[in-house]
Image: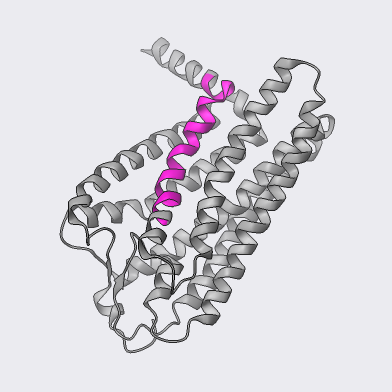
Amino acid sequence: MKGTNNGSLEGFILVGVSDHPQLEIVFFVVILFSYLLTLFGNSTIILLSCLDARLHTPMYFFLSNLSTLDLAFTTSSVPQMLINLWGPDKIISYGGCVTQLYVFLWLGATECILLVVMAFDHYVAVCRPLHYTTIMNCWLCWLLAAIAWLGGLGNSVIQSTFTLQLPLCGHRRVDNFLCEVPAMIKLACGDTSLNEAMLSGVCTFFTAIPLSIILISYCYIAHAVLKIRLVEGRRKAFNTRLSHLVVVLLFYDSATYGCLLPAKTSNQDQGKFISLFYSVVTPMVNPLIYTLRNKEVKGALRRLLGKGREVY
């Protein structure tokens, strides 16, 4: 980064909860447990989506993309969190911090777009059922997935690079669990109004606008579901779409609130715990929400375990 800082040589200090050392072991255990659940749950969804032919549908293609993204999302930050919480050394190298900044922002923006894509898939499935296979063909699914991943990458390259131009003037203490844009803006000793305006604009584009689109699409979905005469069919449609809606609200609410907090004036603890929520908690509960309420996934898991017993 520019300025008179020596962060490029010495790295940065991730403060986390070091001001309250008695809490570090508690956070270590909770985050480790959440990370293991995240690895197991998302890996299971990816495995089932690949191995079970009944799950070779657009819905599970996008769900496996979400699980892949959640695995990478947590792995880009959680191991470093655990290292810093376990011992007295809170240092992250300059290269590690920059890599975390780019990757974390890339994957976060990608998830914002991917959730919109999944909402579009649900909309077509419910509101245009007779044309679903024609509209959601293989080519379109891959195109939408590529748009999500490349769109997130483009946002990360632009916003992270812009953030790294700020002068630090020797500041190295990142009052957060990870290197992310709002935390890095707080380190700057110069005028950050342009960076804050850009952050607010990007957050609006990647959170508020997609969330509005998803909620509008779900109004149409709810209207179409209510027209289904069979109670069982209506219940199945509601259960499947409700799982996605819960994931959407968990992710967007925390991400929007965290990004739109004023970078210089917001409560420090408030910002870091919001970051912890959408980087640790949300990727953990996503597979739980989808599997606990989804008969197809539970059925695929039973079939996979049944084959395993037969082979054994």
Residue at image coords 23%, 57%: 84
Residue at image coords 40%, 39%: 38
Q: Quadrant of residue 273?
A: bottom left
In the image, farthest residue toward the top: 310
**What range of the chain is rendered magenta?**
275-298
Depth check, front residue: 262 or 248: 262
Relative vertical location of residue 270 with respect to residue 244 in this rendering, above or below: below
Indicate the position of residue 203 as horizontal and vertical percent values: 58, 63
Depth check, front residue: 118 or 136: 118
Indicate the position of residue 66 as horizontal and vertical percent values: 54, 43
Magenta-colored segment: predominant secondary structure? helix
Q: Quadrant of residue 98?
A: bottom left
In the rendered image, residue 288 lying in the magenta stretch gets the answer yes
Residue at image coords 78%, 27%: 226
Relative vertical location of residue 42 with respect to residue 173 in this rendering, above or below: above
Numbered circles on residues, count: 0
| Quarter containing the N terminus | bottom left
| Quarter containing the C terminus | top left
Indicate the position of residue 144 as horizontal and vertical percent values: 68, 49
Depth check, front residue: 10 or 53: 10
